[in-house]
Image: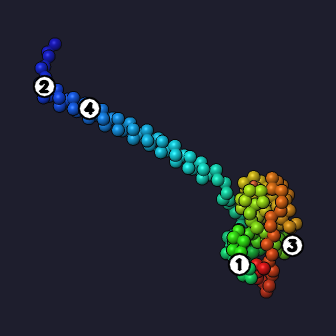
Amino acid sequence: MNKTPISRKSFIRLAAMLGAGSAIASVLSACSGGGQGSSGSDDEQSTQASGGGGDTTTAQAAGPDVSSGQVIAQESEVPANSALAFIDTDLGQPGVLVHLSSGDFVAYSAVCTHRGCTVSYQPQTQQLACPCHGSVFDPTHDAAVVQGPAATPLAKIDTELQSGKVILT
Ligand code: FES
């Protein structure tokens, strides 16, 4: 039991070091807690981003921005049973030009009448489908609702075929 005497000066230095260590530990703890809070915030943001659901994956080519009188596409650019997405700048909305298997071209607003998600053409079913809540529209019958929850057809966009070009009218 060998007791080493400690000077007042050494005691004060040791106490200062312990105090500093404690302060650093407190700061690190606070930072760590803040990090968790920040991380939680990031989680909320990513949940919000993925929960938005407004954006959709389209099963069709992306076309141009067009206004009335302009060409949406050359007839040859859109094979039968396929579609081309475009922006109708007059309406300020996405549209979808569908080349039906019959050979006719039809165009509709791509804005789902349920809650506004973007529909896309499905060649397998030859219908326009909304990825948000499952509404389905029939492009061969004025985009009539085949399956809800949408209750009304997609809005028709008038087009005309002139010299092998599909024109927004
Ligand atoms: Fe299209 Fe709901 S937004 S089905």
Q: CA distance from mark 2 to mark 1?
A: 88 Å
Location of residue 66 (image quadrant): bottom right
Pick out the residue farthest to the front: 91
**Beta carbon of the mark 4 residue lies under 8 A of ligand 1:** no
Tell me the residue at 64%/53% (across/down).
52
Which quadrant does the N terminus fall into? top left
Three-letter amino acid code at the position of disc 4? Gly
Q: Which of the two discs, 3 and 1, labels the residue nearer the N terminus?
A: 1
| Residue marked by disc 3 | 102
Three-letter amino acid code at the position of disc 2? Arg
How many C-alpha atoms fall within 10 Å of the one at disc 3: few (<14), some, or many (≥20)? few
- Return the x and y of residue 31 as percentages of the image width and height: 39, 41
| Residue marked by disc 2 | 8
Front one among 159 and 80: 159
59 left or right, relative to 142: left
Pair 3/2: label in front: 2
Q: Which of the two discs, 4 and 1, labels the residue nearer the N terminus?
A: 4
Q: CA distance from mark 4 to mark 3?
A: 84 Å
Q: Which of the two discs, 4 and 3, labels the residue nearer the N terminus?
A: 4
